Image (spheres, rainbow, N blue to C red):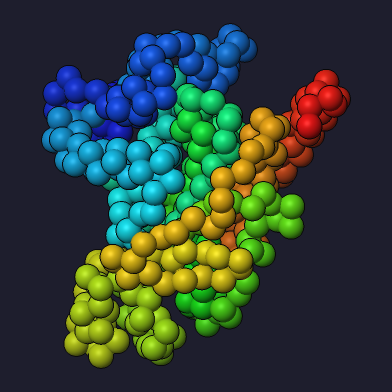
Amino acid sequence: MTNKFCIFCGLPPSSKNKEHIIPEWLLNLTGVPNRKGKFGIDFSTGKEREFSVDSFVFPACQKCNSEKSNLESKVKNIILDILDRKEIIAENFNFLLDWFDKVRVGVWLGFEQLDKNKMFVPSFYINQRIAMSDRVLVIFDYDGIGNGYTISGVDTIIFKFMPSAFLLKINNFVFMSVSNLFILSKKVGFPIPKKIDITNMNEFLIKQMLASKNDNITQWFHDDFPFPDLIVGQVIFDASLAIKNTALYDKDFIKKMISEEYLIEFEKIINKSTDNMNLKFKTKILQIINGHFKVNDKKDLIKWNRTRIKEESITAIELLIHLYKIQFELYNDSSYKYNSDHKKIIKEINKTFHTQTYQIKKSANDFIRKNKKIN
């Protein structure tokens, strides 16, 4: 696909406007805006792409760009508060989660355009992926790793097929953004699908919903997953699921978790006084603490899980290995029934995943051997 498209809506840009995937305020916050940065491998030359970080821009409609400017203003202040380790009111995490959806999908579209893949035709754009599925944000504060920003996990084969998880380092903080169908629902007791079919058009067909158990959320991570400073999440589901499975959703604990602005419409569906299937429902912000979750009202303060600690830079490599595991498991979820083409892709991804993980672990071991004297 060679025609230019707006990364927000997918339509031809209505004006010569461009969107910074990494916003200018973040470039200024993390260093000199026109510094050089690395942006994956150029597969036509086999060399790593390197250019000014403020040049990582792509076409956007002026209308779309303007609509997102309010989100950027809000998130800038939230990020500044996080960097100062201030307590954040729960409702602000709605904006932060939206922003990470925006950046994650924007990076995916941006890298595909850098690759100049003529066969690439996006099946969705940023606007079609903000607040569309369950999402989790894991935050790590590692004092002393230095200023700057780094995007990780976006040059894997899995991310190319399913941009559901990535890492973003902002100065001393590392953020892991994960979003996919039902990843949090099945851990907090919401109904989950028995089976999801994926069509040749990459559309999801949910055949049957089942009740789920209130599971231990830490099982979503690996046993050796580094203890984070903060984990927040949000369940998001289609109204059509509640309409077709009223008995499963008509639970007091679910009603208590639904965000206030959606509760009236949710009650209408439960009481069968509306059949509006075009709605999306969000829960309140959930904070995950020691394997359990806390439901937060809008004005509740989200407190940090622990005091600041100091870690060696090897942690960044460890986090990348965990990210690869999460990407792989999301794609290879056993609840999905893949067609034959997807099964072939999974087989290749399986090989690539183990190769990349081996290479990262080897780099980590080399680093440790060279720095044995570091305490």
Image: 125 above or below 109? below
Q: Position of residue 180 (x, y in %)?
A: 48, 55
Q: Position of residue 248 (x, y in %)?
A: 44, 85
User: In the figure, residue 355 lies in which quadrant?
Assistant: top right
Q: Does the image show residue 329? A: no
Q: Is residue 45 left or right of residue 296?
A: right
Q: Is residue 93 left or right of residue 51?
A: left
Q: Position of residue 42 (x, y in %)?
A: 55, 15
- Residue placed most toward the observer, 56 or 221: 221
- Residue placed most toward the observer, 19 or 375: 375
Residue shown at 36%/54% (left/top)? 88
Q: Is residue 290 left or right of residue 171?
A: right
Residue shown at 20%/33% (left/top)? 65
Quarter of the image where the N terminus is located: top left
Image: 311 above or below 362? below
- Residue placed most toward the observer, 328 or 1: 328
Quarter of the image where the C terminus is located: top right
Residue shown at 42%/39% (left/top)? 83
User: In the figure, residue 58 lies in which quadrant?
Assistant: top left
Count of numbered circles in the view: 0
Image: 186 above or below 87? below
Residue shown at 25%/84% (left/top)? 267
Q: Does the image show residue 84? A: yes
- Residue placed most toward the observer, 73 or 267: 73
